[in-house]
Amino acid sequence: MSGSGARVAAVDVTDGVLPADTTEDVRARGAGVSAQVAVLPVGSFEQHGAYLPLATDTLIACAVAREIAAAYPVHLLPPVTVSCSHEHAAWPGTVSISAVTLHAVVSDIAASLRRSGVGALVVVNGHGGNYVLGNVVQESSARGERMALFPAAEDWETARERAGVVTSLLTDMHAGEIETSILLHAHPEFVRPGNESADFTADDRRHLLTVGMSAYTESGVIGRPSLGSAEKGKELLASLVESFGPYFALLTAAAERK
């Protein structure tokens, strides 16, 4: 092996992440109001400790979106992978775009969908730092466009309780019990050893936006990943699929009234 360090083989993350539809598949699904809802996973490319990949949030958003697409007649889109991860900039590998750029990307995607006859967009957000997505939805709704942001904090809380996740949403901030569980279920091949001994908590993070994550954790972890399990991940996703029902009903009912 050449070079000064060992090389780690790249893993193909496209399986189960990118939709495999052809244009004819989309055409066949296009009749009726319910088919006019698109689902856009938005993740991030940021550190998740030593045992979860940089693409963790994207993989989670895609897992949620994929389960939704299996249960509802929606148009599944490929993910937006790089987003607003500026609070993680102290760790190698993290890449960000500005909030202005993310706002523009999602808005442009929604406009393109409307031009092609898909009038509603659900943004499935996998990264808590993408605050601007709430503004995108607010502004779109004010213009009379159909858009939703999913999951809400209440949806995550319901999922946490159903799955038996012990850690609170406040404590389980990053690379913790929830994220580790979902990847252990949906993509166990990407979970490396180390989560069993990586627990670290820092509930008081009031200056996070000013000083970033590195002021609160050396490892990049805030949560209890040792408690993660594939069974919890499966139940988390199942609960989120059920919680999506009212969102789908709201968006399709709005289309029928037009």
Image (cartoon, grey):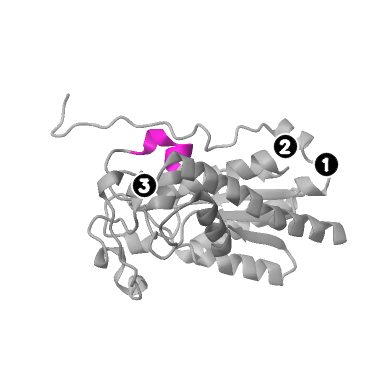
Disc 1 crowd, CA 10 A, few/some/many (<14, 14-19, 20+): few
Q: Which residue is mark 1?
A: 31
- Residue at 27% x, 55% y is 91
Task: Give the answer, above or below, for where 17 lies relative to 200.
Answer: above
Q: Residue at x 72, y 70 (%)?
A: 143
Quadrant of the rendering where the N terminus is positioned: top left
Spatial separation of the CA atoms under disc 2 and disc 3? 31 Å
State which quadrant residue 83 falls in: bottom left
Q: Is 212 or 205 nearer to us in this picture?
A: 205
Quarter of the image for residue 70 reads: top right
- Mark nearer the viewer, 2 or 3: 3
| Disc 2 residue type (three-letter) | Val
Residues packed near mark 2 inside 10 Å, few (<14), some (14 to 19) or many (20 plus) = some
**Residue 118 percent across, percent down from the top left:** 74, 50
Closer to the chain start, of discs 1 and 3, is: 1
Check if residue 53 falls in the magenta segment.
no
Question: Where is the C terminus found, in terms of image quarters?
Answer: bottom right
Where in the figure is residue 40, as x and y percent of width and height? Answer: 60, 50
Q: Residues within 10 Å of mark 3 (few under 14, many from 20)?
A: some
| Numbered badge on residue 26 | 2
Task: Using the numbered discs, state the Cα–Cα distance from disc 1 to disc 3 in whole angstroms.
Answer: 38 Å
Q: Secondary structure at mark 1?
A: loop
Is residue 190 shown in magenta? Answer: yes
Kindly identify the residue that appears in the image at 31 percent across and 59 percent down: 89
Please report the bounds of the magenta region as a residue range.
183-191
Query: Label 3 amino acid?
Result: Leu
Residue 156 shows in this picture: yes
- Which one is nearer the viewer's eye here, 91 or 250? 250
| Whole-number angstrom distance, CA of label 1 to CA of label 2 | 10 Å
